[in-house]
Amino acid sequence: MEILTIGFEEQLRLLRRIAAPIKDINGEIVQLAEDMIDAMVKGNGIGLAGPQVGRLERIFTLKIGDKDPMVFINPEITATSAELSSYEEGCLSIPGQYADVNRPAELQIQAWNTRGRPFTVEVDDILATVIQHELDHLNGILFIDHLSDRKRKKILGKFDVDAENYPEVE
Ligand code: NI
């Protein structure tokens, strides 16, 4: 399973698209989740979202440390803390680039698992950051969108993307 990167115009355009809700959590979606987990682990990532593998569907996977991988389908953040935390973020679609991003330190999220069951979890720390980063992907938002224009321009430049040609979310 190929992971899209911002260095290719067509792939960047896909990464800037808003993903659609998954209507039926069927065997094909279960397989997609498994393939995404494999690709994520192979790429040494801790999170991966549908659009990053060319699937404009609301699904992301994550795996932190030795914990079991998790799958979030049609996720919605239902509460966030006022308190922020800052982590150095990276992204499999923006390889080799890292920058500090401020996000709410804690949140509550509701989603469906691959058995089609809804669940709600409250998370903090790195898990809260990864979840927000992955949920952003479902809305066409990349971590560089949280940086200053200057920093974003610098990172885009490393992939030969002119800041003026950076696509709007659609
Ligand atoms: Ni990412």
Image (spheres, rainbow, N blue to C red):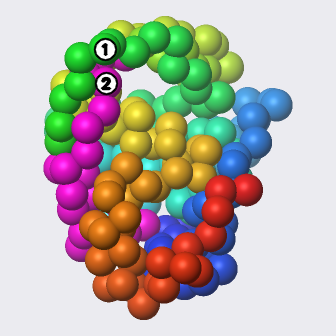
Dot 1 or dot 2, earlier in sequence = 1
Residue at 42% x, 67% y: name it: 93
Distance from Cα at disc 1 to Cα at disc 2: 6 Å
Do residues under tags 1 and 2 come within 8 Å of each other at their CB atoms? Answer: yes
Question: Which residues fall within the magenta stretch?
Answer: 88-107
In the image, residue 153 lies at what x, y percent? 36, 74
Residue 75 part of the magenta segment:
no
Residue identified by numbered label 1: 82
The image quarter containing residue 132 is top left
Image mark for residue 102: none
Q: Is residue 129 above or below residue 159?
A: above
Residue at 45% x, 11% y: name it: 79
Residue identified by numbered label 2: 104
Amino acid carrying label 2: it is: Pro
Question: How packed is label 1: few (under 14 Cα within 10 Å), some, or many (20 or more)?
Answer: few
The extreme right residue here reads: 23
Q: Relative to the observer, which residue lies in front, 83 or 112?
A: 83
Mark 1 lies on a secondary structure that is loop
Within 8 Å of ligand 1, the CB of disc 1? Answer: no
Q: Quadrant of the C terminus?
A: bottom right
In the image, residue 72 lies at what x, y percent? 53, 30
Amino acid carrying label 1: it is: Ala
In this rendering, would 88 be left or right of 62?
Answer: left
Q: Relative to the observer, which residue lies in front, 80 or 24?
A: 80
The image quarter containing residue 54 is bottom right
The image quarter containing residue 160 is bottom left
In the image, residue 82 lies at what x, y percent? 31, 14
Q: Is residue 85 above or below residue 98?
A: above
Mark 2 lies on a secondary structure that is strand
